[in-house]
Amino acid sequence: MNIQTIRTKAFQRQSGRCTYCNCPMWQSSPDQYAVEHQVRLSQTHEFQCTAEHLLPRCEGGTDAASNIAAACWFCNSRRHQAKRPLSPEAYRAKVQRRMKKGGWHSARPT
Ligand SMILES: [Zn+2]
């Protein structure tokens, strides 16, 4: 399986929601997403579905399906900005704390 197929399967398994922030994501149609979830088109980029490597590639993580979860672009890129990314569990807890305070995404998809 290629990485796109694995990502799509993860997207379906997670009912289209990000493994970290639990927001709905989109795979191919930002326009439709903006209408359906009432966010501005300029904000849809944050919610694009990406293949998240649970064990980062820089730490030897592979493209195997067992190492891939579906995460929104925003959560994925923020996690890997750290020199040593938090574990998926610790990062999810951090994201959830930030979400509660309303300080994570620039928009709240409905
Ligand atoms: Zn997310």
Image (cartoon, rainbow, N blue to C red):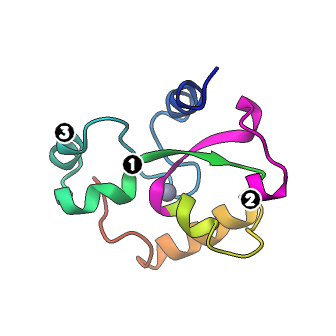
> Magenta span covers which residues?
57-74
Q: Secondary structure at mark 2?
A: helix
Q: Is 44 drawn above or below residue 9 in the view shown? A: below
In the displayed orientation, state which residue is furthest to the top.
1
> For this view, does 74 lie left or right of residue 37?
right
What residue lies at 56% left-to-right and 69% top-to-bottom? 78
Q: Report, in whole angstroms, how far the alpha carbon at label 1 lies from the one at label 2.
A: 21 Å
| Quarter assignment of residue 39 | bottom left
Q: Secondary structure at mark 3?
A: helix
The residue closer to the viewer here, 2 or 23, is: 2
Q: Are marks 3 and 1 in contact (CB under 8 Å)?
A: no
**Marking on residue 32:** 3
Q: Is residue 16 magenta?
A: no
Which residue lies under the disc numbered 2?
Answer: 89
Q: Are marks 2 and 3 in contact (CB under 8 Å)?
A: no
What residue lies at 78% left-to-right and 58% top-to-bottom? 58
Q: Sequence order check: which comes first, mark 1 or mark 2?
A: 1
Q: Is 36 drawn above or below residue 84 in the view shown? A: above
Q: Is residue 66 magenta?
A: yes
Q: Residues within 10 Å of mark 3 (few under 14, many from 20)?
A: few
**Marking on residue 48:** 1
